[in-house]
Image (cartoon, helix red, strand yellow):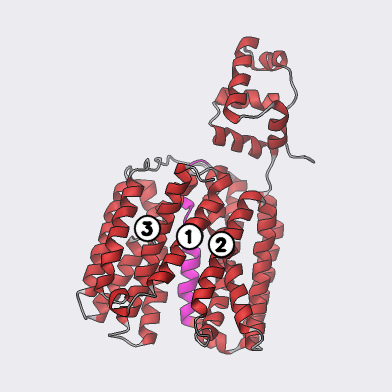
């Protein structure tokens, strides 16, 4: 788990999330000196969220067109810092709002997050991605909370750039030392892949709406609880780490836990409106939201394994969430006041999520032995010929039978088999257990 490359990407994610989320909070705090709270919420949550979504969309577009995506990452990160200096250098609320949105769009909350998630897909083995993502994201979340404890003169002013600028530069250096993303050629997606992508998109969009509504309901209670913000950050990180471990070790259990978390989001609305165990309910709500954060990210990151080259889609789950968060700002006031209507809406959406999950997503997401074989080939970098030999080897064919089928000599097959054992570190029996699904 703690290999050099894993630690490097944990740092990239932690630093990237820390500076984009912390400067986002700093700009909101500073903007309150010139505007009322309703205006700041509208700019930060509606336009800020949509700017983040637009940044991820811009990343996907550039991936299709450019041969040097890394250069754009560096330029946009620097541009985000410049826009932050302009933000603090003016008292015009319109210009400040534009700068806030520019930071969201070009920084590691928008364009940069798409790039970070693609690095995760390309450089981290699938069996570690959940933990690398959640440790990095969790560290960034804790650091964001810690910076809010600083005096307002440092945290809520231009002085905060003394902290943020070195963090951005360090983040750029870590990213720049990575190999750049591969150039995407024209791809033809199969019908089953398209169906899987559509069903996954529907699920994440509905989950984003459910999560956004629940978060808004929680936010109406949380400010009445002194010091709870610190506790929720810790609980949130615990939820992330549990979810990250489960998705790496037991995907089926992770999916079940994610669905349960959305059942609890419905209970959150009921329990909070009854004023029952507010502290416990809110902390559990933050614990469970970590499962959705991992689900919306890693399921799209892992699309890269299903279709080589689709890494540019890695940030699309977060993009869906940002769009929903922005839309909810427009309707949240009237919606939250009517708890009965809120419960009905949540129940209907939850039923649709379960329906799509069991009828479409689960069916299209089910692994086959061929999928397992492809994963082994990608993970251990087996050649095309070694893949063919492995496919026959796990079917209990002898070296002579494999040689006859592939029209090669027995000695050549022996060399390929030896290379397979050496690269994977497994015996024939272990390879069979890894590649063959029972009941197929």
Task: Give the alpha-carbon distance from disc 1 to disc 3, as whole Å.
Answer: 17 Å
State which quadrant residue 42 falls in. bottom left
Structural distance between the alpha carbons of marks 2 and 3: 23 Å
Q: Which residue is mark 1?
A: 137
Snapshot quadrant of residue 412? top right
Label 3 packing within 10 angstroms: few (<14), some (14-19), many (20+): many
Around disc 2, counting alpha carbons within 10 Å, would you say few (fewer than 14), some (14 to 19), or many (20 or more)? Answer: many
Q: Residues within 10 Å of mark 1 (few under 14, many from 20)?
A: many
**Picture quarter with the C terminus:** top right
- Asked which secondary structure carries label 3, the reply is helix
Q: Position of residue 186 (x, y in %)?
A: 44, 41
Provide the residue span drawn in magenta. 308-330
- Residue 319 on the magenta span: yes
Q: Residue 302: where, in percent of width, then height? A: 55, 48
Label 2 vs 3, first from the N-terminus: 3
Q: Is residue 216 above or below residue 338?
A: above
437 or 283, which lies in front? 283
Q: CA distance from mark 2 to mark 1?
A: 8 Å
Q: Say if mark 2 contacts mark 3, CB within 8 Å.
A: no
* Residue 252 lies within the magenta run: no
């Amino acid at each position: 788990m703690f290999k050099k490359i894993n630690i490097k990407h944990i740092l990239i994610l932690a630093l990237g999330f820390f500076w984009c989320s912390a400067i986002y909070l700093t700009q909101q705090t500073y903007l309150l000196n010139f505007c009322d709270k309703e205006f700041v919420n509208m700019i930060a949550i509606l336009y800020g969220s949509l700017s983040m979504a637009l940044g991820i969309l811009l990343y996907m577009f550039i991936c299709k067109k450019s041969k040097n995506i890394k250069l754009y990452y560096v330029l946009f990160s620097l541009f985000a810092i410049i826009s932050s200096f302009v933000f603090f250098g003016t008292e015009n609320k319109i210009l400040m709002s534009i700068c806030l949105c520019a930071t969201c769009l070009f920084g590691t909350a928008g364009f940069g997050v798409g790039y970070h998630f693609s690095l995760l897909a390309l450089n981290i083995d699938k069996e570690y991605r959940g933990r690398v993502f959640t440790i990095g994201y969790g560290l960034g979340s804790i650091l964001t909370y810690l910076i809010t404890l600083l005096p307002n003169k440092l945290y809520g002013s231009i002085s905060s750039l003394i902290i943020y600028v070195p963090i951005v530069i360090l983040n750029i250096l870590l990213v720049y030392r990575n190999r750049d993303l591969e150039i995407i050629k024209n791809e033809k997606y199969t019908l089953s892949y398209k169906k899987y992508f559509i069903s996954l998109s529907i699920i994440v969009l509905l989950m984003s709406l459910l999560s956004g509504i629940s978060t808004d309901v929680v936010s109406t209670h949380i400010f009445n609880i002194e010091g709870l913000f610190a506790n929720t950050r810790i609980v949130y990180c615990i939820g992330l780490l549990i979810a990250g471990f489960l998705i790496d070790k037991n995907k089926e259990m992770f999916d079940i836990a994610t669905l349960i978390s959305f059942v609890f989001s419905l209970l959150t609305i009921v329990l909070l409106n009854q004023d029952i165990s507010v502290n416990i309910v809110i902390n559990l709500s933050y614990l469970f939201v970590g499962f959705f954060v991992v689900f919306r990210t890693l399921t799209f990151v892992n699309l890269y394994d299903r279709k080589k080259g689709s890494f540019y889609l890695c940030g699309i789950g977060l993009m869906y969430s940002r769009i929903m968060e922005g839309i909810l700002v427009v309707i949240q006031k009237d919606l939250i006041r009517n708890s009965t209507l809120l419960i009905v809406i949540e129940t209907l959406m939850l039923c649709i999520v379960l329906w799509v999950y069991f009828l479409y997503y689960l069916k299209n997401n089910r692994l086959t032995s061929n999928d397992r074989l492809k994963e082994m080939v990608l993970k251990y970098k087996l050649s095309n010929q070694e893949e063919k030999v492995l496919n026959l080897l796990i079917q209990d064919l002898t070296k002579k039978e494999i040689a006859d089928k592939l029209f090669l000599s027995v000695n050549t097959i022996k060399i390929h088999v030896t290379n397979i054992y050496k690269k994977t570190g497994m015996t024939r029996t272990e390879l069979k257990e890894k590649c063959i699904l029972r009941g197929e």
